[in-house]
Image (tube, rainbow, N blue to C red):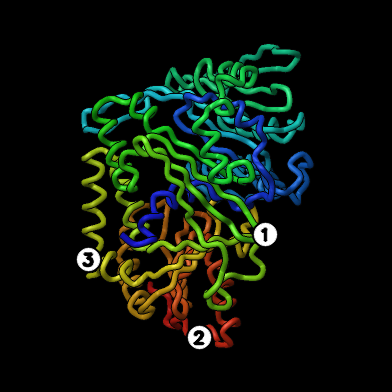
Amino acid sequence: MTTGLRRLPSLIAAAIFVAPSVALGSMPESLVQAVPKDSVASYFVAGSDSDAASGGAASSLGLAAFVIEHAQDFGLLSALSKRTRIWVDEFAAISELLDYPHAGVLLDFRAAPRSDGGHQLAGLHAALILRTDGANTRIEQRIQHLLNSYTNNENSTLSHRERDGAAVFTLRDGRLPDWVELTWGAVGDHYIVAMGAGSFERIVATMADRTSSLADDAWFSKASETAGGPAASLAGQIRFDAARAAADDLLVSKIERVQETLLLTGVDRGLWTLGRRARIIAADAFLRRGDRDEWVPITRSGDAGLPPGVIPDEATWYIVLDVEPRALINTVSKAYLSTKSPQAERKSREFWERLQERAGVSIDADILAHLREPMVIHDYPQHALRLPFAWTRVIPLDDPAAVRRNLDHLLDVARVELAKEASIQLRREADGVWYLYFGIAGPALAVADDRLIISFSPEAVRKNIDLLARSRSVSPTTMPTSPPAP
């Protein structure tokens, strides 16, 4: 097993928690104390380095809030479908959330088996806990925007009560399952948004009793200290043992399949952390496997050996991953499919097999096999709304011409298939940049010189292509100049 594959399970879990603006701060102890020690999963974010309380246009949400809340006045969202509008609102809410030190916690869940072998959510208790220090205006404005957009007098019931002089609100909606109950309000220096009856009260009780929280959990304390948790900007922990205990036999087998695919067989719980040293993001993992604890460093500690332009000077952070991209993509794909019902998994496999057959291209042999390590991820150019996962990935290639040719064949066929869905299109520009379009252009990708560049928009891809070309003192004329396919 290669070094990259040994690091793969930790990498995948850690990547979930990478945010577009990782702070140079540490995790507030009060957030750890707010999370019950028997929770199924939780994550922690130190918050961005912007002033979360200011609410100014310079903050990561300033532009997002302006665009979304005033978009109808300017017609900016007129081309978006209702489903896309919901995604935009969700991303804007996440962008604001990342400004605050906060924790997300999955307290417990219930899943009911379906006749097709899959499962559907039958109950969920979860919460978001934000350290606001009393500056709650932006959070309340965001909640009000969502209420105005998605609730109505006919289906929605909003009630409130007083708790220690602060209002606590509860929302129920007849269009949602009975177990969906949302409660939110300020508690001291924190703001809590909870789902599921009793979840809000459970977090409040944990904040008042340290012995019931992760702050008093011996294993978590050991893992956090070893993996750099106290100084981490982001962290996440999963209790696989708790998830299995809450599942029926069929769901347990799915969880175990996912663990096996991610090379996490036998792991009962794990903690993954991310932190920054100047611009470098460092990631670590600490796993409990059987009766042993394992500490696993994930990322490189620097950029030694990388060609000029791969890491832009303008990037505020970067991460260098010594992992084989082919193995990473295959593992993530298998893990995703292992969570689906047998019928859904079969349909997905049939779709991709049909696509490859029509294109005469094997994704694994003709594209993924040519991807090399290390993979670099950075935040240049920065997305205007600082949306999560809106970054650039740069992957070395051993045969750029073959990858470009095979991608063109495959995506040409995919474009025809997607054309059958009115809500989304796949487009190719004259310079060889491919991108999805659904009212918003992106994500996008292109092959330039000996790199595959993937980013959140066609323009973001082009900026990185130009940067690589300038850094190597060559013109970006290595890009194909054929006209876009019809």
Corner quadrant of residue 292: top left
Q: Quadrant of residue 113?
A: top left
Label 1 to label 3, Cα distance in Å?
48 Å
User: What is the C-alpha distance between the residues marked 2 and 3?
Assistant: 30 Å
Label placed on residue 278: 1
Task: Where is residue 472? Give x, y as percent.
Answer: 56, 84
Q: Relative to 279, is 144 above or below?
A: above
Question: Which of the numbered marks, if any, corresponds to residue 261?
Answer: none
Residue 321, compared with residue 409, is above or below; it is above
Callout in the foreground (1, 3):
1
Quadrant placement of the N terminus: bottom left
Labels 1 and 2: the sequence-earlier one: 1
Amino acid bearing label 1: Ala
Residue 358 is marked as 3
| Above or below for 151 versus 383 | above
The kind of residue on which mark 2 rests is Thr
Task: Pick the residue in front: 432 or 285.
Answer: 285
